[in-house]
Image (cartoon, rainbow, N blue to C red):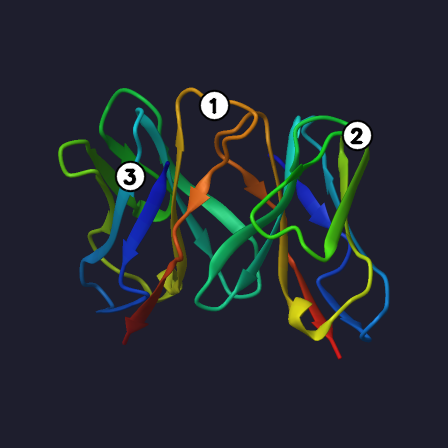
Amino acid sequence: DVKVTQSSRYLVKRTGEKVFLECVQDMDHENMFWYRQDPGLGLRLIYFSYDVKMKEKGDIPEGYSVSREKKERFSLILESASTNQTSMYLCASSPAFYEQYFGPGTRLTVT
Amino acid sequence: AQSVTQLGSHVSVSEGALVLLRCNYSSSVPPYLFWYVQYPNQGLQLLLKYTTGATLVKGINGFEAEFKKSETSFHLTKPSAHMSDAAEYFCAVSHVIMNRDDKIIFGKGTRLHILP
């Protein structure tokens, strides 16, 4: 089975802090994705990566950056957390641009 | 451009009744279609997918969906609802010929409530 893990299930940070969300997949997938999920808005794509050291902006990249130094790991960085970044963050991976496999999510609260 | 519309952000059915969650898509090329389920405080789990071939696809937990090209629909059904089916369901579309800029498009989700 594909396994996608995320570093934290719940995280509380203060406004202005730098926040790192880590995602690791164990199936040698080329593609990895970061989404945020908010009530009524569904899933919104923040960034994705189709190869090591490659990244592409999604629909809402503002306020975020990413890093992919190794194939299995894709990190989401909030350079200076703000309260409007309080959300559920979901990481996913896929062998191609077809079905995606999701991690359990990180519920981030910024106070 | 692709898009997905899920009709009804909330659907309630009685335990034992038919579950029908509606999904319509828009795609200029042959689509790949997916249904995902999300239980509270968890990630999304793939329920079933249509790529090519048989238009009626069966998934996990007794769910199935039928691809109807003429109606651009991919509705999700289950003959008899169970309390454990209470969750949020997402329909998604991608298409057969993908390039680097293409992504899977998700609907906004339908929350399924099961009434005892």
Q: Residue at x 25, y 68 (%)?
A: B15
Residue B93: quadrant of the picture: top left
Q: Indicate the amino acid at tag 2.
A: Lys
The disc numbered 1 marks a residue on which chain?
B
Is residue A104 something that shows in the picture? no
Q: Are marks 1 and 2 on the same chain?
A: no
Q: Position of residue B78 (x, y in %)?
A: 24, 51
According to the image, label 3 marks what residue?
A: B26
Q: CA distance from mark 2 to mark 3?
A: 33 Å
Q: Residue at x 30, y 46 (%)?
A: B63
Q: Position of residue A21 (x, y in %)?
A: 77, 54
According to the image, label 2 marks what residue?
A: A53
The disc numbered 2 marks a residue on which chain?
A
Q: Can you say which quadrant of the picture contains the N terminus of chain B? A: top left
Q: Are marks 1 and 3 on the same chain?
A: yes
Which sits in the foreground, A39 or A24? Answer: A39
Relative to residue B105, is residue B51 drawn left or right? left
Estimate how packed mark 1 is, as few (under 14), some (14 to 19) or many (20 or more) residues with alpha carbons within 10 Å. few
Q: CA distance from mark 1 to mark 3?
A: 16 Å
Q: The residue tagged with tag 2: helix, strand or loop?
A: loop
Q: Indicate the amino acid at tag 1.
A: Met
Q: Residue at x 21, y 63 (%)?
A: B16
Relative to residue B53, is residue A51 drawn left or right? right
Residue B98: image tag: 1
Is residue B100 something that shows in the picture? yes
Q: CA distance from mark 1 to mark 2?
A: 21 Å
Does the residue at mark 1 contact the one at mark 2 (Cβ under 8 Å)?
Answer: no
Vertical placement of residue B61 versus A78, above or below:
above
Relative to residue A94, is residue B1 drawn left or right? left
Q: Indicate the amino acid at tag 3.
A: Ser
For marks 1 and 3 on the same chain, the one whose residue lies earlier in the sequence: 3
Q: The residue tagged with tag 3: helix, strand or loop?
A: strand
